[in-house]
Amino acid sequence: MTQPLGGYQNEIYLHGLADQVPPCTTDATRLADSAREILEPGPFWYVEGGAGSGATMRANREAFDKWRIVPRMLRDAAARDVSTTVLGAQLPAPVLLAPIGVQSIVHADGELATARAASELGVPMVLSTASSNTIEDVAKANGTGPRWFQLYWPNDPDLCISLINRAAKAGFSTLVVTLDTWSLAWRPNDLDHSYLPFLRGIGTAIPFSDPVFRSGLADTPENDTPMAVLKWVQTFTGSDRNWEALPFLREHWDGPIVLKGIQHVDDARRAADAGMDGIVVSNHGGRQVDGAIASLDALPAIANAVGDRLEVLFDSGVRTGADVFKAIALGAKAVLIGRPFVWGLAHAGEAGVRHVVRSILAEFDLTVALSGYRSVAELTPDALARGC
């Protein structure tokens, strides 16, 4: 039995004896407010903002509030283990770090800091194609840590092959294919600030460093960034694939493939029929379709339909350890944490990411124990009640 993750709270209290406090709040629901005080409006709203009126973002949080945990007593929960296995990998808890791009806009170390913190904690990091750092540099920073690669599927098949080959060579074990962002949504916060980092050559390190991408340029991205950015726009936006395109990925990727952005039961079934290894029930954190269904509302039916055929993962709206508990109880095998760790990065780089992730893991562990459970496998819908 490993040391409970909830022990992090003891560390924090003990550090208080030396007048040391955490680098940022332990309440993940307050992180955005404090990050707003230290970031410029453009970068802050690029991370925090959603599509349209923000209705989908609000729905994501409201969906969690509709469910209530029902604690059980005298269950011998002091000895517990919240570790789990996802796609053959042993994890300390059912938590991964979601693929979030352009992390350098909140901290200079960007994805490198996240990679180091994730490796130390044994939590898989999912690297975005829109990273501020190259695949190889992030892999080096991540060391022996578990890591997955998220693909924004480019229009150029040779470039696609090159990107996923680089990821495989750099030790990324699982391919996460984002389906819902082949074109950017209407995002008023970004539009009001006229802020899109990619047009400034930020978040383009992976394609700009790729030999196939570079071979199509008259000059290097370093010498002619505007033309490289124009090619990036043409290559990564505007093409929506169909289900018949998936065999191409299987042909060129030997490891597990996960489809991210599934919100309908029929799409989940088609993913299983196509031989995919997993899906992420996700609405992209409310960043793509305004007024869409909350991810948590979509989760139970999808998990019931295909949970015995592939791994059902979840993201969108997860902020706390209690949120992780609820998503697992409703059928997710694991959840992806997004904005909270980025706010930790903004506050204190690697130390901030580590603190925020440890805080969420600790709260999850304590929530499991204080609700009377001893393992992730025991978390079922019976652990919850529908609230008002």
Image (tube, helix red, strand yellow):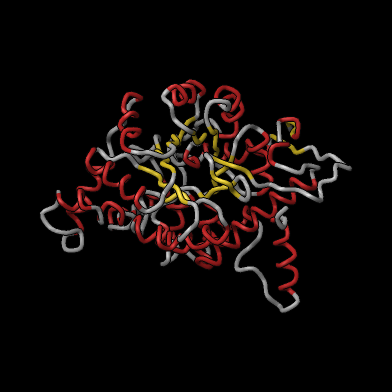
Residue furthest to the left in view is 218
Q: Position of residue 32 (x, y in %)?
A: 55, 56
On the question of residue 194 being in view, the answer is: no
Using the rendered view, name the quadrant where residue 306 is placed. top right
Q: Nearer the viewer, residue 331 or 32?
A: 331
Residue 9: image location, x then y, percent: 72, 62
* Residue occupying image coordinates x 46% and y 57%: 44
Residue at 32% across, 39% down: 153
Q: Residue at x 50, y 29 (%)?
A: 263
The x and y percentages for residue 243 are 36, 25
Q: Nearer the viewer, residue 313 or 4?
A: 4
Left or right: residue 372 versus residue 40 is right
- 372 vs 147, nearest the viewer: 147
Q: Can you say whether 33 is above or below 67 in the image?
A: below
Report the quarter where the C terminus lies. top right
Visible in this render: residue 204?
yes
Q: Looking at the image, how many numbered discs can be counted on the residues?
A: 0
Q: Is 178 rendered above or below residue 232? A: above
At x 43% / y 46%, what residue is drawn?
A: 173
